[in-house]
Amino acid sequence: MEKIGKFGKNADLAKTIGLDTHATEYWNLTPAELIEDSIILGEGVLTDTGALAIETGQFTGRSPKDRFIVRDEKTENAVWWGDINIGFDPTKFDALYEKMKAYVKDSEFYVRDVYACADESFRMNIRVITEQPWSNLFAYNMFLRPLDEEIENFNPEWNIFCVPSFEANPEEDGTRQSNFAILNFTKKMILIGGTGYTGEIKKGIFSALNFILPHEKNVLSMHCSANVGEAGDTAIFFGLSGTGKTTLSSDPNRRLIGDDEHGWSENTVFNFEGGCYAKTIDLTREKEPQIYDAIKFGALLENIGFIEESSTPDYTDGSMTENTRVSYPIHHIDNIMVPSKAGAPKNIFFLTADAFGVLPPISRLTNEQAMYHFMSGYTAKVAGTEVGITEPTTTFSAGFGAAFLPLHPAKYAKLLGEKLQGTEIKVWLINTGWSGGSYGVGQRMKLSYTRSMITAALEGNLDSVAFEKLPVFDLLYPTSCAGVPSELLNPRATWSDKQAYDETANNLAGKFVKNFEKFATETSPEILAAAPKVLA
Ligand code: ATP
Ligand code: MN
């Protein structure tokens, strides 16, 4: 076995994780080297701005049903088992790992030493071992990068072993199908096989931190983006996929802390990651200049199309997937916080893309409402992009990220509640979704309007305006906001058919109440009282 690249004295996979192969190992290659290898292997091409464009293969998104957690002494009584956190037998894990090792015995692979958590007290060293050079570039882009001198003594705490071409045999291996992502908290290892979707690597570590930080270190881990203003005022933006975390946290007037995963310790909000993972569908320079300009040499584009006979990306092309993406190291954005941490938030935004067009584009929540909406984690997606499908579907995902939360949602809510109590932190609910009617009738709120509303909230300009209360949801919304037509602020007023609005609102309220039933026993009466009032 030959080792090429940059590595320290603990760069012995046979010793650290029992992985002994006969082919070349490429250690901590530079982005340029990884990009070159991807192109030589025929796995990627350069775009006209120098980004590498690759295809992830059969999987262009995560596969939540194939994400498992090894069920053993460490996790048995701590993890909230169910459809989201699916248990995996420890002996099956060992057997599968043996099989994977045998499978790669004669293959070359790429090794990368990185870490998570920008706050030194919580730093987690990670070694990512990948079959493809571009998945290794993804790890470089998304995690925090150690200094050259840190590589010398780098000691990995967690290991990720990512072999997309390895397919499991469900009957023998205990998986659901051929692809899998399995977390083992005892061995501190993540096995990924049968899928080349890079997001599994990033969300694997996120899930691990969502267990370790709240459970062992009393730190609230959050599926949110974060930025900080001139005055040092931190803002965080919670939201499910597609609600605007990445888009809205990129703000030329505020320094970016991170776009997706953060921890909130005693007095600090810190990024887990060292890069961003932005959607590129319908991306334009005009609407999202910071993200657009970050797509340069070093950035990794996934599953995009090209303008015919050119190397110019066609961001409108969703033929491979709607989930086209780009990853880039955070320093591709101009205005960033270094290191990626700041003080406790002054403003918290809950983002929802309400495809029913019921919720106000901005409203201010009481602490009880904040807890209620945090536990609910509502968004509504459009059913599909095919013609004729007009029915939006509700998603309730506790903590705005249940898919990545190994513990019971009440655990995260409790930590958030403690942090809000007795403070002046303002919590806002932002509807980045529909207005003037549900999907099919109304339109999505203009990004420039949403940006103006957030700016107004951040600058304290909504403190002096009059608020009105939306019936059913009891949400307080401002009646004026600079840069936004006032008639858009009351959702009911934007619907031409008021009766249709009332019916849709009442229907949605019913879905909130029904979803919350499962939390009734562990929720205080004050929080339960913040539920929407369904009319008979
Ligand atoms: P993920 O968790 O999957 O990374 P995300 O919360 O970061 O999702 P974004 O990548 O920010 O979501 O996606 C929001 C998408 O919605 C972008 O493509 C953005 O251009 C589009 N969009 C349209 N209108 C708005 C709006 N009013 N506010 C925010 N985003 C909007
Ligand atoms: Mn994002």
Image (tube, rainbow, N blue to C red):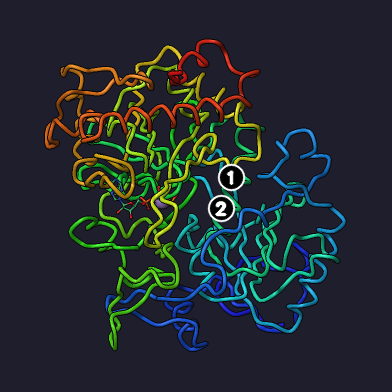
Task: Depth check: give the residue in front, 397 or 54.
Answer: 397
* Residue at x 69% of width, y 44% of height: 83
Q: Amino acid at mark 2?
A: Lys
Is residue 433 found left or right of 412 in the rendered image? left
Residue 262 x/y as whole percent: 47, 41
The disc labelled 1 sits on which kind of residue?
Answer: Phe
Q: Is residue 322 left or right of residue 16?
A: left
**For the point 48% across and 13% down, which residue is it?**
529
| In this view, 316 is above or below 535 | below
The spot of residue 176 in percent (x, y) is 74, 60
Q: Is residue 136 above or below residue 360?
A: below
Q: Secondary structure at mark 1?
A: helix
Q: Where is residue 497 drawn, in percent x and y?
A: 25, 34
Corner quadrant of residue 65: bottom right
- The picture quadrant where one finds residue 50 is bottom left
Can the viewer see residue 371? yes
Q: Nearer the viewer, residue 57 or 252?
A: 57
Q: Are marks 2 and 1 in contact (CB under 8 Å)?
A: yes
Distance between the Cα atoms at labels 2 and 1? Answer: 7 Å
The x, y position of residue 182, in whole percent, is 71, 56
User: Mark 2 highlights which residue?
Assistant: 203
